[in-house]
Amino acid sequence: GFTLIEVIIVLMVLSIGLTPLIYFFSAGTSINRNVKDVAVATNLAREAMELYKNEPYANLSGFPPTNTESPVSNFPDYSREVKFTQVQTGLYQVDVTVKWFNNKRDVKIVTYRADY
C-alpha cells in the first residue's frame, strides 16, 4: 500500500506539472480566437476593397473623403470604415479599416486608384 506521505508527494508533483499545461491550453485557445478574428476582419476588408476596385474611376469622385463607419451585415461584432482621399489629380487613396472587440482591435488595408 501507499503511505499518506507518498500520496501527498504524488499529488504535489502532479499539481506542479499540470498547472503550466492548463495555462498553455487556455493561452492556445485565446491565440486561436485572435487568429480567427484577424482572418475574418481581413476578409471583410478585402471584400469591401474589391467593391471599390471594381468601381469605375469616374465614380470615385462621388464618394465622400471622410470616414464612413458602418456595421457589417451577418457580423455584428465588426464594423467597417472606408475613407477616400484624393492624393493628387488622378489619384485616390482608398483605406478600408475593419474594427472589432469594441473598436480595440482593427485591420487596415490601403490601395490606390489612378485615372489612366
Image (spheres, helix red, strand yellow):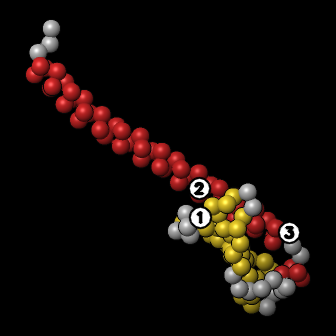
Which of the 4 image quadrants contains residue 53? Answer: bottom right
Taking the view exactly as shown, the residue that stands out farthest to the bottom is 89
Q: Is disc 1 in contact with disc 2, using a CB cutoff of under 8 Å? A: yes
- Taking the spot 36% from the left edge, 38% from the top edge, the residue there is 22
Q: Residues within 10 Å of mark 2 (few under 14, many from 20)?
A: many
Q: Position of residue 103 (x, y in %)?
A: 56, 70
In this view, 109 is above or below 12: below
Q: Quadrant of the C terminus?
A: bottom right
Three-letter amino acid code of the residue under disc 1:
Trp
Give the CA separation, mark 3 to mark 1.
Answer: 26 Å
Three-letter amino acid code of the residue under disc 2:
Asp
Q: Which mark is residue 21?
A: none
In this view, 35 is above or below 63: above
Q: Which residue is mark 3?
A: 54
Q: Which residue is mark 2?
A: 37
Three-letter amino acid code of the residue under disc 3:
Asn
In this view, 101 is above or below 20: below
- In this rendered view, identify the residue nearer to me: 87 or 85: 85
Closer to the eye: label 1 or 2: 1
Q: Which residue is mark 1?
A: 100
N-terminal label among 3 and 2: 2
Q: Position of residue 57 (x, y in %)?
A: 86, 79
Which of the 4 image quadrants contains residue 113? Answer: bottom right
